[in-house]
Image (cartoon, rainbow, N blue to C red):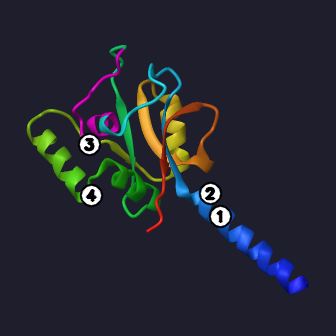
Amino acid sequence: MRKRIFRLTIFCLFVCTRLAFAQVVVIAHKAVPEDTLSQARLLDFYSGEIKAWGNRVPAVIFDLKPVNAIREAFYQLLGKTPSRMKSIWLKKMLMGEGDPPAALESEEEAVKKVAATKGALGFVSKAKVTPEVKIIFVIEKKDK
């Protein structure tokens, strides 16, 4: 009986841990005029095609440093590889159309920067979200 309870506990912890890490969310500054974004609009913001929100406040885009599972899930949603996004931003820089998003060290830093920067947009795991930002898109991780 004890073995069975132990196995069930381990199984539940495993499933709960996987679910906790499965959700990546896109967060925005509280003053951003939109409450949701489509996948296409997210790509437009992150590729620099859209530079401002509907209220004309400049969009400030934050990224995470490479080699990050949260970042990988986000770029999968966009349908672009990190190297493809890098080439898009290099092209924009060379044409004088903007700079790439600031790459932040941690999710905690991303939440703080988004909360403190009017017009900001970023992505983190759902567990890192604080009341100072709003969630505008939830990415469900698909198991392969």
Could you tell me residue 130's position as x and y percent? 63, 38
Of the numbered discs 4 and 3, the one sitting upstream in the chain is: 4
10 Å crowding of disc 4: few (<14), some (14-19), many (20+): some
Q: CA distance from mark 4 to mark 3?
A: 15 Å
| Type of amino acid at the residue the image marks with label 4 | Thr
Distance CA(mark 3)–CA(mark 1): 33 Å
Query: Please, what is the three-letter code of the amino acid marked with disc 3?
Result: Pro
Earlier in the chain: of badge 4 and badge 1, it is: 1
- Depth check, mark 3 against mark 1: the one in front is 1
Residue at the spot of label 4: 81
Give the SS element for disc 2.
helix
Quick one: SS at disc 4? loop
The earlier-in-sequence mark between 4 and 2 is: 2
Magenta stretch, residue numbers: 41-54
Q: Residues within 10 Å of mark 2 (few under 14, many from 20)?
A: few
Q: Are marks 4 and 2 in contact (CB under 8 Å)?
A: no
Residue on which the image places disc 1: 17
Kindly report the distance in space between the C-alpha atoms of the residues bearing marks 3 and 2: 29 Å
Badge nearest the viewer, 3 or 2: 2
Residue at which label 3 appears: 100
